[in-house]
Image (cartoon, rainbow, N blue to C red):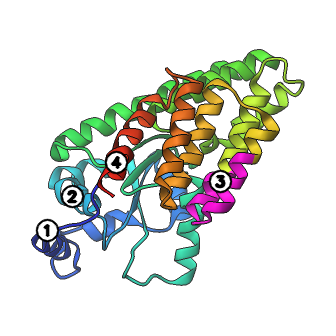
Amino acid sequence: MASRVSFASALAVLLVWSPLFAAPGVGDLWTDDFEAAKARAKEQGKDLLIDFTGSDWCGWCFRLRDEVFVKPRFIAEAPKGFVLVELDYPQRKKLKPEIVERNAKLKAQFHVSGYPTIALADADGRVYAKTGYQQGGEDRYLDHLAELRKIKSWRDNALAEAQKLSGIDKAKSLDAIITRLGNARVVPMDNPDWVAQILQLDADGKAGLKAKYEILQQLDVAERLMGEGQFAQAIASVNKTIVDLKPTGDALQEACYVKGMCQHRSGDAKGAIASFETGLKASPNGPKSRHLTQYIQVLGKSKGRD
């Protein structure tokens, strides 16, 4: 998504969010204190809506604010079910060092790679869905949030059933929950405690889950390095994972996806295309196949213009 915004649009956003022009009560809706938000959500029986935003540069963030967050119905309805949290990653605006550090940790914790990312979590901070900008204005966005909240109800019921099980049956149940949450953009390492349980329950690796989640843990390390801009180290980490753990199928596709994204962000389009193509061959109908195909097409066209 484009990160540019017209002068008129930028001015409109500035007017909306300036303390002199803010709608009544808007400034009271959002907090940047994640821990305080969790405490309030638990006290009030609400969920968390966490907006990872680039407040002074991200065009799609501007549009989400203009079209949804400052609209009367959102202001009236959203706080009934959510404590609203804004975590900012500006390019020009200066934040206090402690806020920059705190936000960086939360970005890594929630595996955020683009803006705006909207994470929905329970009062304990366990994420159950992620989304971003959606067309259609405040009414459609509120409907979208209502649909995503149904995922939490399903998740909680499924977790309750999983707790009745033991051993490999429980591990498989947790794996099924994680897999389904993937449709809501929730990655396995968003819930590391579940991953730890699966690794413990399949300690001998006979169910095949130990290898799967050890690979995902290693790829999580690489993604964190990528998020810090340490692309060479991230690529080396993925290569080591592939050599040491020998992933196949969907797991190899995921590794190739992470490696390709590192290469793409470091400016190596040719290397990224090669990694994405390897990922497609590893699992032609895998969970990342559609994304890999799109990236190959886009990067191929970009190379053709160079």
Three-letter amino acid code of the residue under disc 1: Ser
Residue 37: x and y in percent read: 49, 60
**The residue under label 2 is which amino acid type?**
Arg
Q: Are marks 2 and 4 in contact (CB under 8 Å)?
A: no
* Residue linked to disc 1: 9
Crowdedness near tag 4: few (<14), some (14–19) or many (≥20) residues, C-alpha within 10 Å = some
**Residue beneath the point at 53% across and 76% down:** 99
Q: Nearer the viewer, mark 3 or mark 4?
A: 3
Q: Mark 2 or 3, which is nearer the eye?
A: 3
Report if the CB atoms under discs 3 and 4 are less than 8 Å apart. Answer: no
Q: Which label is found at residue 63? A: 2
Residue 129 badge: none
Q: Earlier in the sequence, mark 2 or mark 4?
A: 2
Q: Does the stretch in magenta take in 250?
A: no
For marks 4 and 1, the one nearer the N-term is 1
Quadrant location of residue 140?
top left
Is residue 147 placed above or below 107 in the rendered structure? above
Q: Is residue 273 visible?
A: yes
**269 lies above or below 178:** below
Q: Which residue is mark 4?
A: 132
Residue underneath mark 3:
235
Q: Is residue 175 above or below residue 80?
A: above
Q: Magenta region: which residues?
A: 221-239
Marks 3 and 4 sit apart, C-alpha to C-alpha, by 27 Å
